[in-house]
Image (cartoon, rainbow, N blue to C red):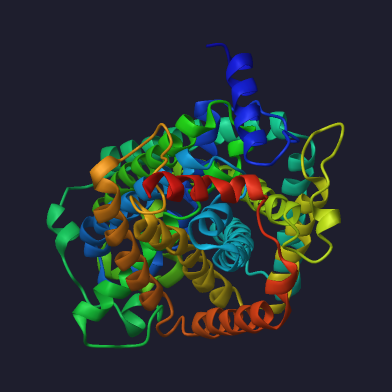
Amino acid sequence: MSEVESASDDAAQLKSMGYEQELRRRMSAFSNFAISMSIICILAGGVTSFAEGFCRIGGAAIGVGWPIVCLFSLTVALTMGQVASAFPTAGGLYHWAAILGGRGWGWITAWFNLVGLIAVLAAINVGTVEFVAGFHGVQLTFEQRLIAFAVVTFSQAFLNQRGIRTTTILTDFSGYWILIVSTLLTLLLIVFANDFQFSRLITFTNYSGEAGGNILPRTESIAWLFVLALLLPAYTITGFDASAHVAEETVGAAVHVPRAIVRAVLFSGLFGWVMLCAVVLAMPNMDSAAAQGSNAFVWSVRGALPTPLPSIMFYAIAVAQYLCGLATVTSASRMTYAFARDGGLPLSSLWKRVSPSHQVPSFAIWLIAFVSVALVAFAPYSAVAAAAAVLLYISYVLPTALGAWTYGRSWTQMGPWNLGFWYRPLSVIAVVGSVGLMIIGVQPPNDKALYIVGGMSALLFVAWWSCVRRQFKGPPSELLAKISASRTKSE
């Protein structure tokens, strides 16, 4: 089947769900994979959050903790792919929750996912600005950081405004760039390492307090430090729902979207693990590296590689981080567009507009950019970064839990990508693990995230029961009828 015929079939399937094909459908299977790979970006989260793991428990955070969380993330990706194959729309998680659980669950999931994506964008771009300033030895004031953040974010919005062709070219490049740069950095660290003490990767060292650059207040509990160190891979391996958000721009979405989600997590987990293991093995001294705190990654690479290789690698990493933010703008704007299309946002008629010339949701793109800048201006970075992963995993776990409950009961019509028997046990693991990560994510010193998530949950509850449930119609009846058809068939 040609791409034109496949795209036509995709448009027909979308129409059967109650939507017209408004966005330009031209993304290939690789492009869909690349956008999730770009948002996960092991050269962003894996670098800027390196101290969150290493400066708590040492090398075991990488050697032991990273693969544990990545295997869990893979179960989330597998179960997400199952639902994405059945319902390939730009709304992604929002639509899945609405179909499987009703309008209320869909509306709540949409808000958690959208705010989570905006928080992730803020965390990524602030991390990029601080990383570049850090390896140049520059200490930015609040105003300088905010201006730099705004320039980076608005430039990403401008590139998104140019259309999906421009975005696809850049995210395709980003997918290759991440793999090439992480591989090259790994090889350089191995070549120039003085020796290989593999025991470093399974050594649990208490680096709380001053020993870890005061990343975490002093505690004597090794077990608790290890649990908190799991936030390093948890912060990094997020955002793979991007493949679902661009489903309406992907050719053969019902097959290629779930494959892209799983492959992005698998490749990111593997390449990220090998790269960060190489960093730990090449460190001149583990204690000295930990004492650097948030600068541990930069210090370690500078100490392991001869000049000018560290600077070259840092610039290459910064490019990957910028493209990570670019892909996040794409994902968040499509989520905004899909939610507004169903009347879920204030001024929805504005945010759902599609540019006639570029066939992208222009107003949604710029809304995401401006809100993320406002978020950085008024909220502490630490609170934003901590809340981002928690909010996203809440939006991941809700449709997964609903899918586990309805699978084989009211939901019997699956897509072409089907886990079969394994869906339900994997979804249970995904739900339990997500709840665990959410609990860890709001512990001190990230307890501000608890107030953000708790406050948002309370506001959503009040808003839904006071007025929204009488006004919000949710996805079109054709899309909601998909689950009704399954229910009738099962009965």
Query: Compared with residue 423, is residue 379 higher up or lower down, i.e. above or below?
Result: below
**Residue at horizontal 34%, vertical 84%?**
209
**Image mark count:** 0
Residue nearest the viewer, comparing 437 with 23: 23
Q: Residue 312, how many percent across, how many down?
A: 51, 41
Asked if residue 131 lies left or right of residue 71, the reply is right
**Residue at horizontal 48%, vertical 56%?**
100
Query: Compared with residue 203, is residue 36 higher up or lower down, i.e. above or below?
Result: above
Q: Taking the image as drawn, is residue 268 in sight?
A: yes
Answer with the quarter of the image where residue 65 lies: bottom left
Q: Residue 169, how many percent across, how many down?
A: 64, 29
Query: Compared with residue 17, is residue 144 higher up or lower down, i.e. above or below?
Result: below
Q: Residue 188, how many percent across, how many down?
A: 34, 38
Asked if residue 410 lies left or right of residue 8, the reply is left
Q: Taking the image as drawn, is residue 306 in sight?
A: no
Query: Compared with residue 268, is residue 210 higher up or lower down, i.e. above or below?
Result: below
Residue nearest the viewer, comparing 142 with 103: 103
Residue farthest to the top, as pictured: 2
Asked if residue 50 lies left or right of residue 312, the reply is left
Asked if residue 77 lies left or right of residue 120, the reply is left
Residue nearest the viewer, comparing 8 with 360: 8
Q: Residue 178, how many percent across, how many down?
A: 47, 38
**Residue at horizontal 27%, vertical 64%?**
61
